[in-house]
Amino acid sequence: SNRALGHLPNASVLVNMRILQLGQAGFSTPPDVSAMHDLEVLNVSMNNFASGPDLENHPKLKEFWVTHSGMVTLGRMGPLPALQSLTAEFSRLRELPGLVASERLRVLSLYGNKLSDPPDIQYFKHLEVLDIGDNHLVEMPNLENAKKLRMLTARRNDITSVSL
């Protein structure tokens, strides 16, 4: 039998939630996490929605996982000053919303999407891991400020030149 959750019942009582693991929960629309301002880890991987959850007011969010989702866009993302890891792999992302206010970002994994423009990483001075493999990129992101980068994956793209 299919034991998928499908929706988040009465999310308003979960205001103190810090870690929310909803992978393979059977969601067809993103879960409403708008009242969970203390959320530090959110995993909504392996669900089937076109846009990610609303993350406009989550100042403590450190990790966001959304893989194998079929998403075309990450959805509304406000300032995420504590965000350290964004893993959005094997979806259908065509663009990445501005993550300028995520200066603490250390891991950005976008493998297996449909991105044609490289992510703007100029403000990610703490970025250590960047995975942009298996997309539709023709150019590399500007790596000038990526002084702490220690792993870069860009295979399976259409990149014709690299200037480091």
Image (cartoon, grey):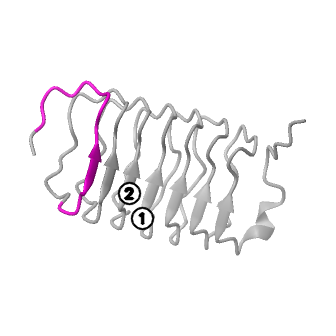
Residue shown at 40% from the left, 37% from the top: 95
What segment carries the magenta color?
147-162
- What percent of the width, then of the height, locates residue 141? 22, 43
Picture disc at residue 84: 1
Callout 1 touching callout 2 (CB < 8 Å): yes
Instruction: Give residue 65's mark.
Output: none
How would you classify the magenta stretch by its main secondary structure?
A: loop
Q: Position of residue 40 (x, y in %)?
A: 57, 69
Q: Which amino acid lies under the numbered mark 2 shown in the image of this protein?
A: Val
- Residue 57: image quadrant is bottom right
Question: Quarter of the image holding residue 33?
Answer: bottom right
Q: In the image, what residue occupies the spot 72% across and 37% down?
A: 28
Residue 85 to residue 111: above or below: below
Residue 159 within the magenta-colored segment of the rendering:
yes
Question: Does residue 120 show up?
Answer: no
**Residue placed furthest toward the right:** 1
Q: Residue at x 65, y 67 (%)?
A: 19
- Near mark 1 (Cα within 10 A), the count class, few <14, some 14-19 or many ≥20, is many
